[in-house]
Image (cartoon, rainbow, N blue to C red):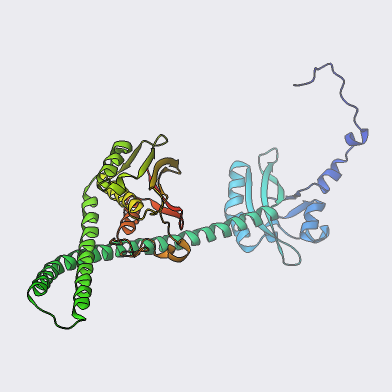
Amino acid sequence: MSAPDDEPLPELDLRLTQEDPDDLYEYAPCGYCSCLPDGTLVKLNHTLLDWLGYRREELVARKSLPQLLTTGGRLHYETYAVPLLLLQGQVREFSYQLRRKDGSTLPVLLNATLVRDANTLPLVVRVTLFDITDRRQYEQELLRAKAVAEQQREQLARVNEQLTAKNEQLTRINADLDSFVYTASHDLKQPIHNMAGLFAELKRAATFHDPEAAGMVQMFDTALQQILTTIDGLTQVVQLQRELEQVPQEIIVLTPFIGEIIRSLQVSSRERQATFALDFEAAPRLRMTRPGLHSMLYNLLSNALRYADPLRRPHVQVSTAPADHGIVLTVQDNGRGIDLERYGRELFQLFRRFHPDVPGSGMGLYLVNRLAHQAGGHVEVSSTPGQGTTFRIYLPQ
């Protein structure tokens, strides 16, 4: 709000109104000089003399303004600034380097005005110079930072190109490995089945008199079944991968979907005794391929029942919750648990099992982890031996 016109002004120190104009000129915070149209210096203020390191008598009528500039600055001033000055009467913010008496340089911005006489002939050029040392340093720092940023950008671009090439290479290698595994398991399946049939016929028709023969026959039969299980598992993994690549994602209502899986698992009296707690209030729907979600939940729920603690009734909790940019699907049981300090790094390896006394293929957790990654998510596990295990599947939505 401005003061009323009739409001008295504050008292001023009269010394502030008695400034000497010559003193203001001589000690201004910028350099002043005047020169003839040909550049001959006729007047300089004390500030400019102090910057240059000259005495007044060394410059006035003895040197010209262009002589105080570096070679490049002198060429620019004489070929560009002077013609422009004659044409329009002034120039603004031309950047030059003043050459001091000791040979060092000082970056300045030059403003100049041409004064003409009564006959419009050029009379004198009045020049104002501003010290831009700090500005020039700042600009140089910016240029250096820009150069570093550009170098880092180029390095990042090269790294991205390398990563893209490696990802493409890994994709091709994975596809080749899947094709190899699928072909090899398919081609091996028939000979192994033939071998199993021949071995079964051998056990039926042959008589073994060696007392250790029965144990060796059993060992061979077990090894043969393990080979068959491994081949079937490899085929299942690759076949499921190929099927999921052709299946689109869809929005799945979780309660009825998991209810069907639970009913399919409750085939024995032991499994029928298990209790399930479902809580999908936070996220009742989930976007994913139906076969992929079915395989993940079927493996986790069947493992929860298979590896239940024999001393207590199995109880499994399945829930959802919002997570960063997606949903976390949690499956928690009260089973035997897993020693993660011992087996944590091997948890998702193919055919790796941690409870040898319980029959299984060792593929379930491998499939769960692979399907989660294929869907763009990941799996986290916490477990306490003797208390149970919790799987958290983070999925983007």
Percent x, y of residue 210: 17, 83
> Which image quadrant is residue 90 in?
top right
Which of the image's four quarters has the N terminus? Answer: top right
Q: Is residue 248 above or below residue 163?
A: above
Judging depth in this view, the residue of 376 and 159 nearest the camera is: 376
Is residue 60 among what the camera can see?
no
Q: Is residue 56 above or below residue 289?
A: below
Q: Is residue 10 left or right of residue 122?
A: right
Residue beneath the point at 31% across and 49% down: 270
Residue beneath the point at 44% across and 53% down: 388
Residue beneath the point at 83% across and 48% down: 26
Q: Is residue 340 left or right of residue 65?
A: left
> Which image quadrant is residue 214 in?
bottom left
Which of the image's four quarters has the C terminus? Answer: top left
Judging depth in this view, the residue of 189 and 153 nearest the camera is: 189
Percent x, y of residue 57: 83, 59
Judging depth in this view, the residue of 16 and 379 nearest the camera is: 379
> Which image quadrant is residue 101 in?
bottom right
Q: Is residue 377 above or below residue 72?
A: above
